[in-house]
Every structure is written in C-alpha cells, then in structure tokens.
Image: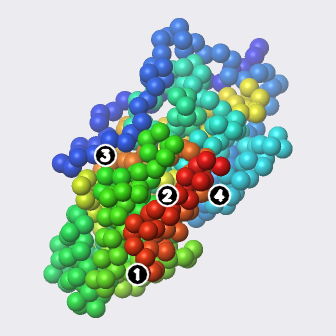
Amino acid sequence: MKKTLAMMTVLLLAGTLLSGCGKKAVEETAAVPADTQGTTQAETETVAAAADTGGEKVKIEFWYAWGDKIGETNEELARRFNESQDKIEVVASYQGSYDDVQSKTQAAFAAGEAPAITMNETASVGTFARSGISRDLTDLIARDGYDLNNFNTGLMTNSYVDGKLYALPYMRSTPLMFVNTDMLEAAGLDPKGPENWDELTHYAEVMAAQGKDALCFPIVNEWYFEAFLGQAGGTIFNKEENGFDFNNEAGESVLNYWRDLQKTGGVNILFGSDSSNMSKAEFASQNCAMLFASVADINYFLDVAKDNGFNCATAFLPGNKTFAIPTGGANLIITSNKSEEETNAAWEFMKWVLEDEQTIYASQNTGYVPVTNSAVESDAMKAFYAEKPQFKVAVDQLQYILARPISKQGPEVHKAIKDMVTEFLMDENVSAKEVLDKTEKQCLEILNE
C-alpha cells in the first residue's frame, strides 16, 4: 500500500498584527492575488504527496545563509523536523552569506544539483522566479487550502512575481535604532530617542556639545538611504520598476540632511565593507548613544549592553513626512527541477517551519520578526515581548514597510546608490543634484542592459 504524507498544516488565524502607533503608514504593500486567498474543499483535495519509496525516507537538502545564532537556529529546526516524523530527512547546509547561497544555488541548479529548498534573499526572489530556478507554489497552496492571510501583509510583498506565488517569508529583518538610554539621560535628552529628523538634529547638537556622538551608522549598502528616502516620499525604483523615483526633492532632502547631520559633529557616518563592525564597536564602547542596525542584532546588543553596564532600548528610525522601513532577510523557495517526492517533502518542511512554534523559536533565538499574525499574537510571544520589549518595536514598525524591488537589476542599482551616498558624504564640493543626476543616468543604463 502506498504511503502518503499528511499535507494539512493548520495555521491559526489571528487578529490584526499591529495595534498602530498613530502614524500614517506608507502604502507600498503589494496586493495578494485573489486566486491564492482561499479555495473550496473540492479544490483542495490532497493528491499523493510522495510515491512509494519502499519505506525509505525522502532525503532533501536545505541550504541557508549566515552562521552564529542564525545557523544554529536553522540546524536546530531541521533536527526538530526530522525527529517529528519518519518520512522525510532534511539535511541543513550552511552556504555563507546571502550572495554565497544565491550564487551557489544558481550554479547547482545549472548542474542539476540544486537543493530542494533554500533561503532566497528578498531582492532576489524575482530573479530566481523569472529564471526558472524557483517553483511556483500556487498549486501547492490551492491543493492544501493553505492560509496565506495569516502572514504579515507587508512581508508578503516579495513573495509574488508577475502575479504568481514563488516564496514565503521566513527570516525577515528591518533596520532599527538601538539606544543607550543611560547616555541620553545623562545628556538631558529623552531616553526614548528622537522621533523625527528635527529631533535627531537636536540630539546630535546636544551630544556634540558634550564631546559625544548621538548616532553612528554604516553605509555598507543602500538600506538606510532607502528608509530615509521613503520617509521623504520617494522610492529607489518606481512602482513599475521600469524607472526611478529618487532624483527629485525627496532624494535631495535626504542627502542634504545627512550632510547637515555630519556638520553638527554629533553623527558618525561610517563607510566601507567593515563599517558595520566599526559602528557596533562604537556603540559597545559607548562612543555613540544611538546606532542604526538590523533587528537580527538585538540579542547581540542586549548582551553587549549587559556586559558593558548600560541599558539598551530600541526605537523606530526617525521619520519625516511619514515613517517608512525597508525589509531585509530571506524568504523560502522550492527549486523547480526536483522530483514530485522531493518537491512535496520540501513543501512539508516549509509549512512546518512556518508554524507558530517554529516561528516563535526562530524569532526569539535570532531577533528576526515573526512572519505570521498568529505567532505575534500567541501567548508565548506576548510574554516574551513583556520581558524583552526591544523585540516588539520591530514588529510595530512593520506597518510602515516599503516593498522591495524584484527587478533582476536591483543589486546593481543598489550598489550604485550606495556609491552615490559615499561620494556625496565624502566630498563636500559635490552637490546633491549632481550625484543624483549622475546616478540616475547610471541606473537607467543598468536597467536597459
């Protein structure tokens, strides 16, 4: 008798993810196609999940990026899944950075040796889908009546490509502002941190007068420019992703504001490939009171604060016309060249790892935001947020998500943006309009290649 895998994973429906903070959200989230919102019972009849393997387990590879807590979490999740059932064996395999896992997956796919399931950095979801590497998940969603409404809407913006579902959110991040509340209080400033650009300027001036930096942040990529640009009403790509929306008043306002911040003497903007580590060291040494960094660093900074004897809180990035926040991290994809057995095994693992228990474990262990509403609203996460409110700030900030581009030219465009910011802030003789004009021309050339 053929054995089939149980294909019905129930995700608990919950209320609204966010209670709101009285600030207008940026309307950049993508609509979820209606044909994946729900299906009738007739449409969700489960077909055989795997062929008869004579009692042998279906063995699949799961490739992931990053080590430390992230690697530890992925390895542990694979181990727990393998212990939870006796039909599938998931082999978790560390592949390096996001760039590493991307390039290795592409090469392995070309050679017919790609993993069945892998982490896919959000900006690369479009490239992998359009090149045929990732599998359209729409039929699996419909077959099992899988509830997509339980996912945070903003985090689903990088799951759809050309109206089809290719990925589900997994370990997702946003930038946060980390705050040394002791330093701010000693300077006579509100320990909650600045809420807007004007207040950030005030904090910088006050701290500079006391010989300290109010803020430091690294220009290691386009992330913070993208956030501030969204706060000023612009975006890097236009909505159609066939042009750009940064060479305008919004783009000029961000660049000129950052230059003005530098001139206060109370903001340290760092450049280069090691700028992220440098900024962390500055914060740990209490040379700056605030820091822009990823939500994935929460556990690290809480440990640093404890070891160095200060209190660390988190806050939204300061807003302007509105609040706006880009996301990072990775989604999960299933590769398209696998057998029916491997595909269904990968789908079972994907569904399992996104259940509440696993989502909660991953969030608490890594700092990444929980991707489902029911996980956020669970008693376990509520208790965790009560104990460590620093984690809750990232979840509250999700209502202001900016959709990330899925254009295959995205990485090149983002590098050009980073180079533009670096040039402008390191050469006071160049104007914002000059670098914006030059960079837009360069980006249009990239787009039309």
Query: Which residue is located at x 79 percent, y 21 percent?
Result: 52
**Residue identified by numbered label 3:** 26
Labels 1 and 4: the sequence-earlier one: 4
**Residue identified by numbered label 1:** 428
Q: Are discs 3 and 1 less than 8 Å apart at CB? A: no
Q: CA distance from mark 3 to mark 4?
A: 29 Å
Query: Which residue is located at x 27 percent, y 59 percent?
Result: 319
Query: What amino acid is labelled 1 in the image?
Result: Glu
Q: Quadrant of residue 12?
A: top left
For disc 4, the neighbor class at 10 Å (few under 14, some 14 to 19, many from 20) is some
Q: Look at the numbered disc 4 and give the secondary structure of its residue.
A: helix
The picture places residue 15, in percent across and down from the top left corner, at: 29, 33
Task: Using the image as rendered, state which of residue 102 and residue 381 is in the foreground.
Answer: 102
The picture places residue 427, in percent across and down from the top left corner, at: 45, 81
Residue 53 lies, with reference to residue 427, above or below; the image says: above
The picture places residue 248, in percent across and down from the top left corner, at: 36, 57
Q: CA distance from mark 4 to mark 2?
A: 25 Å
Single out the residue that lies furthest toward the top. Answer: 42
For disc 2, the neighbor class at 10 Å (few under 14, some 14 to 19, many from 20) is many
Q: Quadrant of residue 293?
A: bottom left
**Residue identified by numbered label 4:** 99
